[in-house]
Image: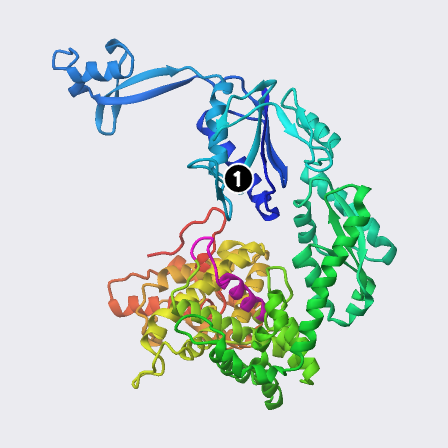
Amino acid sequence: MTDLLFEIGAEEIPASYIDPALNQMKTLFTEQAKKHHLEMHSIYSSGTPRRLTLFVQGLPQKQESVTEEIQGPSAAVAFDTAGNPTKAGLGFAKSQGVDIKDLQIKKTPKGEYCFATKKIEGHETLHILPDILPAIIRNISFPKSMKWKGAGLFFARPIRSLLALFGDQAVPIEINGIKADRFIFGHPFLSGKKIEISRADWELYKKLLKQEDVVVDMTERRETLRTKITQLMAPYGAAIDDEELLDEVTNLVEYPNAIECCFDEEFLDIPADVIETSMKEHQRYFPIKKKKEKLLNKFIAVLNRNESNADTAIQGNERVLKARLSDARFFWKEDRKTPLIKRVEDLKNLAFLEKLGNYYDRTNRIIKLSKYISTQLMLPHEEIELVKRAAELCKADLLTQMVGEFPSLQGIMGRGYAEWDGEEKSVAIAIAEHYMPRFATDNIPTSRIGAIVGLADKFDTISSCFALDLIPTGSQDPYSLRRHTYGIIRIIEEHGFALDIGEILYTALDLLPLFEQKADSRYHPVILDKLVPKIKEFFKDRLFQINIERGYRYDLVNAALKAGIGFDDIHNFSQRLKVIALISQEKWWPDLVTVVERTFNIGKKANSSGSVNERILTEPEERTLWDVYKENDEAVRKLIGEKKYEEASRTYCNSFAKPVHAFFDRVFVNVEDENVRNNRLSLMKTINELYSQKIADLSEIVMPNDKSHGKS
């Protein structure tokens, strides 16, 4: 077995492009290897801003020979009645390079057909790689690519060199005039040397590059940076608190180094969030914060050089940050001259989505929706007024110079400006919180006011996009509707809000200028018949996916989703799912599932409007079952009403398991007498719905060795 080492040397590739490109290289090579019948032991990729490298262990020197069976014409066409080959038979044999005598006749679903069996000799791997490797280069996809050096080649940045070694042999490939050889290049500023590598050996490759100031292994480079940054922060009791930033700077350098810099203490009068954002987003610096989050006038910059010119680098980074902070201080000073409330009217000049007006219109929708949600939650009048004020101001900071320069500070700066304006503290906090969660692992709003305004904002965004048919497809979600939906679900769950998302959606959609209210209907038909069902299906899918990711079994999630009560009350849905997941571990769980499933399978045949008639219950088992229902109906419903789903489930199971089993064992349901038959079906449906309407449809549960139950 032989190893392959493949390096694409290029000009500086953007940091965010590197990981996805390396993953694609592995996937593309694996697909090509499978296509060409090449087995391999392992595959690894790594890189720097100037090289993307693939190392494959354990490739064969030669493809395995394969035997291929090719179907030809039918036997009746290939041979005449006397068994002599026809022109069709001779032509097929010749086209496959076999003698007519070697054709085999086999039975197929369509009759007897001729088959040619050929042994295809494997090719040398060294001769296959010139097809595979250029295909990898041409098929790596980047967010933005450059077309260069002739037609047909697109890449993130111009390719400057290719290394391709199979064992100790150079792979003969050429792409747009660049020939692969056995040379690699050291650090462009610290070395610049051209290095010859004798064989495809990952350790040798790493060693030779390290001698020329390139740490090619990304994990090693990241941990080297972590160690150096941590050492610089340690004297101040600080530590790295941004792993994503560490990942990013790892892909900005080949020689991992870090330096400590500082800025004038006078800039500390700017909000800390602004200083940190200036450092991280624009310059990729690491702020130094003492315990209790106090920001110091010091920061760490990552360096792609050694210590020989550290002083120059420190001065340069300090000068750049000073300019940034000077701008930020100016914005902070100027923005505070205009109170947020006076900016609200100017939101008319900021467009939202086509046909949906501007941000002033959107603000008014958020105010109305926030008030509606507050009313549904029965908040006191004083708190509703605070909600309305927070909703009124929540988008005003979009017009500030600071947010124009640092868009990620929207809401955060709104809080700062609101505090400066003397707004209620709860209003200022809500302005910052209503954007949360900003990403999957972010916190949700801690305040009830922030949570309500956040819900209104997210429901308006989702309703607006669905109304304009801007719906996520595949991996495309330009308006982050999945994230907004996830945020709504988490806020409702964690705050325990009893809300009907269907009613909120009706209200949110009705506020949009697209729909004129009809005289004979509360809501426009498009809202009723199309949009709300479509958005609810979107929520249903998100609820399913989120809870699968949380570790719930898919059948338990489906059972809770498909209960008659539905999932409009997300908090209630989550409570029910937790309970059925818990009781699915109990010994009596199979009995509970059996009762609900068997009554469902029979009861679904019942007339939906039918009710049980006691007078025609003739069999002892059905009379007993009806008596058990009447005795326990109120108790089960009371427990459900009190959200005591575990107790309700246990009571239901203990009450019905035995009499339902006796009913199915001794009572024939599908009798000829239509009235008796329908009455028994209604009895089954009534018992089933006592549980499946309000807790979970356990007919969705998949039990080990699941079999259909029920007697017909």
Q: Is residue 676 above or below residue 261?
A: below
Where residue 611 sits, quadrant-wise, is: bottom left
Residue 659, can we see it? no
Which residue is depicted at the point 65% across and 73% down? 413
291 w.r.t. 331: above or below: above
Determine which residue is flagged by label 1. 24
Q: Is residue 295 above or below residue 113?
A: below
Please name the amino acid that badge 1 sits on.
Answer: Gln
How many neighbours does mark 1 have within 10 angstroms: few (below 14), some (14-19), or many (20 or more)?
A: some
User: Residue 189: horizontal and vertical position, in percent?
Assistant: 71, 38
Q: Position of residue 436 (x, y in %)?
A: 61, 68
Measured as percent of width and height from the top left, residue 350 is found at 49, 74
Taking the magenta stretch, the answer to whether it contains residue 480 is yes
Where does the magenta region start and end? 473-491
Q: Quadrant of residue 468?
A: bottom left
- Out of 289 and 15, give the one closest to the viewer: 15
